[in-house]
Amino acid sequence: MKAIQIKQPGTPEAMEFVDLPVPEPEPNEVVVKISAAGVNFIDVYNREGRYKVAAPFVLGQEGAGVVTAAGKDVKSVKPGDRVAYTGVMGSYSEYSAVPADRLVKVPKGVDDRQAAAAMLQGMTAHYLCHDTYPLKKGETALVHAAAGGVGLLLVQMAHNIGARVIGTVSTDSKAKLAREAGADEIILYTQTDFETETKRLTAGKGLDVIYDSVGKSTFEKGLNLLRPRGMMVLFGGSSGAVPPFDPIMLTQKGSLFLTRPSLLHHIITSQELQARAKAVFDMITQGKLKFRIEHTYPLAQAQQAHRDLEGRKTTGKLLLLP
Ligand code: NDP
């Protein structure tokens, strides 16, 4: 089978298109024939070696496809079932072995591409606005990179809750997409100072919450925009890591809350994984959540997919189609 393997972390060229044997399932595993693999920023961090993974490894942590073989202890799924998963390394591949308790069955009405997109970015958007800071109708949220993979989903969910959504994006075409997803206000943060503009838009009242995946270039200014006891949800660093800072700043800026959450801690148990995936799948089948899947690539072009993602050239979801 074909797969994208990392032997030495590094630039996109570190991703090698190789031939590997089709995996055999362990007793608790199934083998999934991958039809769509999600490309996510975490794959860039893993490729670069920012997060340590023992090499060699097959990249990718999000996939959807069909079960082709099941280990002897597996009861929850069987060959032929359509499934999706996240949080297990190895989806940039034609086949991957996945622990059965990490799989969700994909319902009718959700295609494989939507399922792949729902698992990492969809469930992330879901936990951010339902658990990390449970957003309420009438509250105001700032969503950075609002036309990105997580961004477009989070904007839709926040809008559906009835919150006022302010989004930041880098270009006019991204602004249009974020508006269509339900953002009430858009700031082109590469041209306009988002701190000044957000203060104007909130008339000095302050934001209830900021969902910040951009990090280095946005974090510190964001702390000036929250209402007293508002929450900074820092969930990524696509512009780079936030430098260390003194927690006394949180007091000085209004007894703020700061959290740095990860999806993995919001799908720890099988029960939570199934419930969260179902919530996202239900939004899809009820027409409340739309995916923008414009950027698809053959597996062999994984390097280009990473260049496009890192180069801010993409909107919505990127998928590899093995
Ligand atoms: P996106 O599709 O959002 O792509 C990243 C976007 O970040 C770009 O399109 C760009 O939007 C913006 N950006 C701002 N500055 C830069 C920069 N210097 N270089 C590159 N991009 C920049 O990616 P994802 O949706 O896959 O992920 C978004 C972030 O969320 C990542 O940091 C990721 O690690 C994190 N994440 C965290 C999770 C968690 O549970 N903690 C789970 C999933 C993702 P624009 O051009 O509009 O500025």
Image: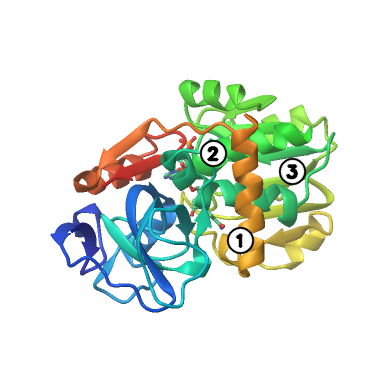
Left of 177 or right of it: where is 305? left
Comparing 215 with 132, the one in front is: 132
Residue 48 appears in view: yes
Residue under the point 39% across and 67% down: 30
Which residue bears the numbered disc 1? 273
- Residue lying at the far left of the rendered structure: 19
x and y, in percent, of residue 112 in the image:
42, 42
Quarter that holds the N terminus: bottom left
Residue under the point 47% across and 31% down: 292
x and y, in percent, of residue 6 in the image:
24, 65
Mark sitting on residue 4: none
Of pointers 3 and 2, the one earlier in the residue sequence: 2
Label 1 sits on what residue type? Leu
Secondary structure found at label 2? loop
Label 2 sits on what residue type? Ala
Task: Examine the image and state in which quarter residue 139 appears.
Answer: top right
x and y, in percent, of residue 142 in the image:
68, 39
Which residue bears the numbered disc 2? 145
Of pointers 3 and 1, the one earlier in the residue sequence: 3
Residue under the point 72% across and 56% down: 132
Q: How far separated are the C-alphas under marks 3 and 1?
A: 33 Å
Which residue bears the numbered disc 3? 225
